[in-house]
Amino acid sequence: MRTIQVIGIGTGNPEHLTIQGIRALNATDVVFALDKGEAKAGLNAVRRTICQLYAERPGCRFVEAPDPERDRRPTDYSAAVDDWHAARAALYEDMIATHLGEDQTGAFLVWGDPALYDSTLRILERVSARGRVAFTVSVVPGITSVQALAASHRIPLHRIGEPVQITTGRRLRDEGGAVTGATVVMLDGDPTFDGLDPDLVIYWGAYLGTPDELLSTGRIGDVAESIHVMRAEARERHGWIMDIYLLMPRGRQSRRA
């Protein structure tokens, strides 16, 4: 039976790949990836670099296919994501059936960790449910952008004995932007943190762990504009950006454990 490995690769630094990930990669016959267009070619360039550095198995192939289009400003977000996942499931099914033999192993190299705000495992569940191709799935955890952000800023994420919330920019806006404790915000493609309480402290980072890493921290009222400028310039330069930030009420960031 076919095997599909879902391998977390971290935030863009090839050294984020764990020893377990390297071993999984070296048991792989085919690495699958989605082509997001020329502007985001750097994403798969990182995947190819990882394969070049660590894949020692002769004949390992890298197979790409165009990523299905997605409505970025839908009126019904859940329905739009469901349609996008369905289109991806059909594509994954074709890729696996066409390029992976019955007793071979394929891999998807997932940014960060497969368990945190990534759709790969859900889409593979859809593929399996369709019944055309049979396979087993294994998962190799990776370093998340949450961990990389804290490491780059040299901070813990929480106050003594307090929880950490991990959410998305969309949900933060939909819920009115209230921040009462440590809050990590991911997938904020159009950041509006300058509309939050200006006294909140922000720890922002992009391209974490790579030579292109950008960092900023301070009171939102003081640093929001400069972060927007850095973000826009970086996106123009690279064609894509992956960033994340931690919000903390003032007076709490120094009481850490």
Image (spheres, helix red, strand yellow):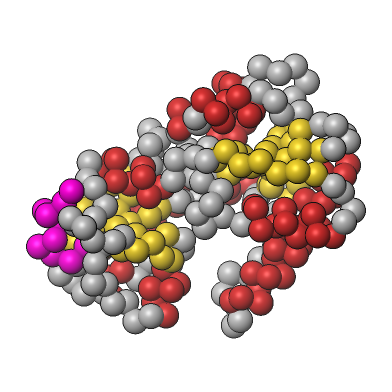
- Residue at 80%, 44% (x, y): give it: 135
x and y percentages locating residue 192 in the rendered image? 35, 71
* Residue 122 shown left or right of residue 95 in the figure: left
- Asked whether, in this view, residue 22 is left or right of residue 158, the answer is right
- What secondary structure predominates along the stretch shown in magenta? loop
In screen coordinates, is 46 left or right of 31?
Answer: left
Residue 231 in percent (x, y) is at 37, 55
Q: Residue at x 26, y 52 (%)?
A: 157
Q: Nearer the viewer, residue 113 or 235?
A: 113
- In the displayed structure, 250 sits above or below 17; it is below
- Residue 94 place in picture, x, y as percent: 85, 49
**Quarter of the rendering containing residue 185:** bottom left
Expressed as whole percent of the image width and height from the top left, the position of residue 31 reads 71, 35
* 256 within the magenta span: yes
Is residue 224 shown above or below 95? below
* Residue range of the region highlighted in magenta in the rendering: 248-257
Against 52, is 212 above or below?
A: below
Residue 223 in view in this figure: no
85, above or below 153, in the image: below
Asked if one can make out residue 47 in the rendered structure from this viewpoint, the answer is yes
Picture residue at 65% right of the left edge, 73% below the top: 80
Residue at the (32%, 77%) spot, across then down? 177
- Return the residue found at the far front: 161
Tell me, yes or no, whether the highlighted magenta stretch contains residue 8: no
Q: Would residue 31 appear left or right of 8 to someone viewing this image?
A: right
